[in-house]
Amino acid sequence: MEKAKRTTVRRSSALTREGIITAAIEILDTAGETGLTFQSLSKKLKTGPGALYWHISDKSDLLAAACDAVIAPKLEIQSVGATPQKIVRDIAGALFDTIDRHPWVGAALIRLPGKMPMVRVLECLGQQVGALNVPENDQWILVSTLLMYILGVAGQNAANAQLAQELALERSHFLNEVSTAWSKLPMTGFAFTRSMAARLQSHDDREDFLSGVDIILRGAKFA
Amino acid sequence: MEKAKRTTVRRSSALTREGIITAAIEILDTAGETGLTFQSLSKKLKTGPGALYWHISDKSDLLAAACDAVIAPKLEIQSVGATPQKIVRDIAGALFDTIDRHPWVGAALIRLPGKMPMVRVLECLGQQVGALNVPENDQWILVSTLLMYILGVAGQNAANAQLAQELALERSHFLNEVSTAWSKLPMTGFAFTRSMAARLQSHDDREDFLSGVDIILRGAKFA
DNA sequence: ACCTGAACACCGTTCAAGT
DNA sequence: ACCTGAACACCGTTCAAGT
């Protein structure tokens, strides 16, 4: 934040780690996870695949760095003066929005347990839960419950986007497909899922997600 | 359950979908997700890779079928007479145990939104929540919150197993690595994560998971 | 109808060779 | 120190050819 970046002066001959990651993010956003290959990335950067390995160690490293670069800035926005509950809700909302815009972030986040992008989320949630009236012994449980819930939604979002792309469908059309598939389930044994088929089409993803956050916050033991 | 299977009479010449799935599960359990390839699978079944495509449509289909075959029986156990809360807890516990034993199930479950293995879990949870005193409008939220939480834990479990295997480490040793990495984080900005490093080693995965389920159940609005 | 296995397109990664 | 790009091992999937 305090470092002045002179992005305009980037020489075309310099292949930097940062430039590679930026290019990777652009590919991921436009072509999805399957679109990012060392071939496509090196082509975009007008170099050979081997050159990339001088700056990044492998594809997992690349994904982690790309994921972190997208997520980190979104977690910095601190709404001062609000209740911790409200801030947690805002953090979750910000995460939902970025994962909604960059579905691959959800998949990357899940596959990197304990690594930087996830630690950042953990820390962000933890600081707010610390300000909550929760006994210290229960803080870990509450934070990890929130984290696992967020990761679950993130993973689903990524999987939905992935499948929708494979079928060359809009995301909403894909959900319609799921909904009609559910309504064709046998009556016996799938009563609940059938009854939820309609709701699947009309619901608001973001609102439902935040309602889940509210449930978890409400269920925490307060001192 | 009521169908008598004569598994012993299986002729060696018959290549059945069921047999393929059984073999795939064996490979997944012993060699992990990366160990299952059409090469390894066809070799185990003493046939060519192309033969498999007569019975399954692609790898995603194979994973879905394997996942469903492992999960479905575990969800049938109904503890009658218990409170819905207790039953939900038991379902979650059963899921945790199978995902713990077969980490690849977690990854498969996440990648198949709206498909059979996941629908089965959804239905199982939904039926119990229906017996709870929750307003009908809130049932979907509660069930999907539970589901997303479970999927998040499942995904983490799969990712942990995957990374541990890549590093040729025991799962507990892998968690130790994460713990020490956390304790080496800079003081400023990572106070919470650092303070949780120690807890990561001593905690009980299963117990923490069920505590999360309790939080969610407690936070649901009861009529 | 079902199986065989070579062949195809594509992937992540390596490495000798250049500058 | 950093880049090039051919080569390697491996993957999912296809398909002409067999039975």
Image: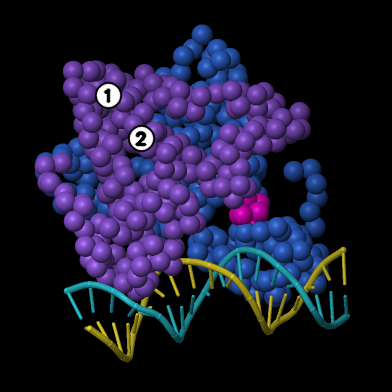
Chain colours: A purple, B blue, C yellow, D cyan
Residue at image coords 37%, 56%: A24
Residue at image coords 36%, 28%: A93
Q: What percent of the width, then of the height, locates residue B169?
A: 35, 63
Decide whether the magenta segment is chiefly helix, strand or loop. helix
| Residue sitting nearer the eye, A190 or B3 | A190
Q: Secondary structure at mark 2?
A: helix
Is residue A32 highlighted in magenta?
no
Q: Which residue is mark 2?
A: A95
Left or right, B26 with respect to B201, comes to right
Rendered-image quadrant of the N terminus of chain A: top left
Q: Which residues are magenta?
A: B60-66
Q: Secondary structure at mark 1?
A: helix
Chain containing mark 1: A
Q: Residues within 10 Å of mark 2 (few under 14, many from 20)?
A: many
Amino acid type of the residue that numbered disc 2 sits on in the rendered structure: Leu
Amino acid type of the residue that numbered disc 1 sits on in the rendered structure: Ile
Which mark identifies residue A87? 1
Q: Would you place residue A169 above or below residue B166 in this image?
A: above
